[in-house]
Image: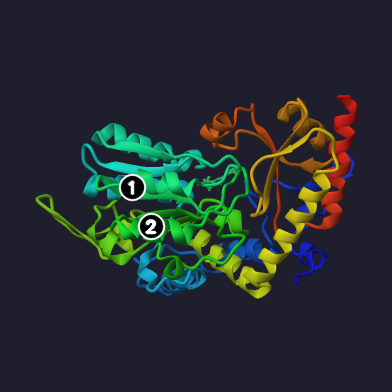
Amino acid sequence: MLNANDIRKQFPILDQTIYGKPLIYLDNAATTQKPLCVTDCIATSYNEINSNVHRGIHHLSQIATEQFEAARGKVATFINAQRSHEIIFTRGTTESINLVATSFGNTFINQGDEIVISTMEHHSNIVPWQMLCQRTGAKLRVVPLTHDLRFDFDAYKNRLNEKTRLVSVTHVSNVLGTINPIKEIIETAHSHGIPVLVDAAQSSPHIKTDVQAMDADFLAFSGHKMYGPTGIGVLYGKEKWLNAMQPYQFGGEMIQTVHFEKTTFNELPYKFEAGTPNYIGAIALGTAIDFIQAIGMENIAAHESALTRYTVERLKEIDNMRIFGTPDGAAISFLVGDIHPADMGTLLDRLGIAIRTGHHCAQPLIDYIGIPGTVRASFAMYNTKEEADVLIDGIKRVAKMFG
Ligand code: 7TS
């Protein structure tokens, strides 16, 4: 088991007051705070080894390149990828999904083809496919949810047919905290010969990611949601798909030879990394992964699940509490009576409690449930039971104000 109070010492931002109250940071699904080792790594990298990667013959460029490629290796180990050239550095989950929508889309999607997503997707796993469908005349098919807001597996099976070219689903819902049966989802798609993209933005910080065990064809996640810096993320893709796909962006580094008559493209992973990459971000993401590994993913998952279960039980003490779905990840969405989520959020903020309100970039899900939005508390490894208690007291106070 991990000691959250010890871990907090690595996160100086948590040690502050907001409106005179100790900060209770429960907006980790949006972004996590960064430990000192990550911010130190960023400063040290800029102060000591900064130099553009893959182009310099000089010493610093070689060190920067080595560290950048070592970070790629750490990511590969972290998600158990077979080959480190299956790791593409991107800006984050959003760019990773856009990359696949563009490159896989341009290569494999034609009029009449179908792409399957679910009702609980984040906008960044909806809109890129919607735009691809508009461009190509393909069709977006959406898997509904069961009455308890879980992925409807029977409906999913019915959505798959000979026209389906890709399934793209989230592993963990950013709104409901539901963990989807990703292995079974992939197995079912594969039995029809359909590849699957996994949106791991909300799972990579919380549960062990193993692309080989789940047999994912693509997997996307963001560094900033797992204690790493902003502006760096990952697309994992099976070599066979990445090799077959057209490049995403064009420019330096992604080419092999350029002549005005003809250009040839670089090998993986560089084919998909046009321009100067965020190599310092990647190096610091590697440090964030070291940090996570030192604490242990199993310990993190156990701590966050216990905290989520405890908070759900305590939330149930509150009159007119509605908890949406089954929060088995590290996020809980709720409403109290008819208190608007924005009012709840504003008043909790005055108590130093940072939570998220609204549609959480999953508007179709919120419409599906038929509510104006939710209040969402989401946990990280540094959150404590005491903080959950402060949240509960805060909600009770707000509820009392609204009578
Ligand atoms: N997919 C899921 C499941 C997400 O939760 C998010 C961000 C994204 C994709 C996009 O990630 P990005 O790093 O590219 O922006 N989710 C949230 C959230 O729940 N609140 O703020 C951002």
Give the quadrant of residue 223. bottom right
The residue tagged 1 is 160
- In depth, the one of 8 and 252 nearer the eye is 8
- In depth, the one of 222 and 202 nearer the eye is 202
Whether label 2 touches label 1, CB < 8 Å = yes
Residue type beneath disc 2: Thr
Name the residue located 75 percent from the left edge and 72 percent from the top edge.
Answer: 1
Q: Residue 293's mark? A: none
**Is 14 on the left-hand or right-hand side of 142?**
right
The residue tagged 2 is 188
Q: In x, y percent, where is residue 81?
A: 42, 70
Looking at the image, which residue sits at the far left? 261
Q: Is residue 249 visible?
A: no
Q: In x, y percent, where is residue 205?
A: 60, 59
Q: Is residue 101 visible?
A: yes
* SS for callout 2: helix
* SS for callout 1: loop
Instruction: Sort mark 2 into few (<14), some (14-19) or many (20+) by Cα contacts within 10 Å.
Output: some
Viewport quadrant of the C terminus: top right
Name the residue located 56 percent from the left edge and 67 percent from the top edge.
Answer: 208
Instruction: Sort mark 1 into few (<14), some (14-19) or many (20+) by Cα contacts within 10 Å.
Output: many
Give the quadrant of residue 354. top right
Q: In x, y percent, where is residue 337?
A: 78, 28
Find the distance from the CA under tag 2 to the CA under tag 1.
Answer: 9 Å
**Is 194 on the left-hand or right-hand side of 68?**
left
Name the residue located 42 percent from the left edge and 46 percent from the top edge.
Answer: 156
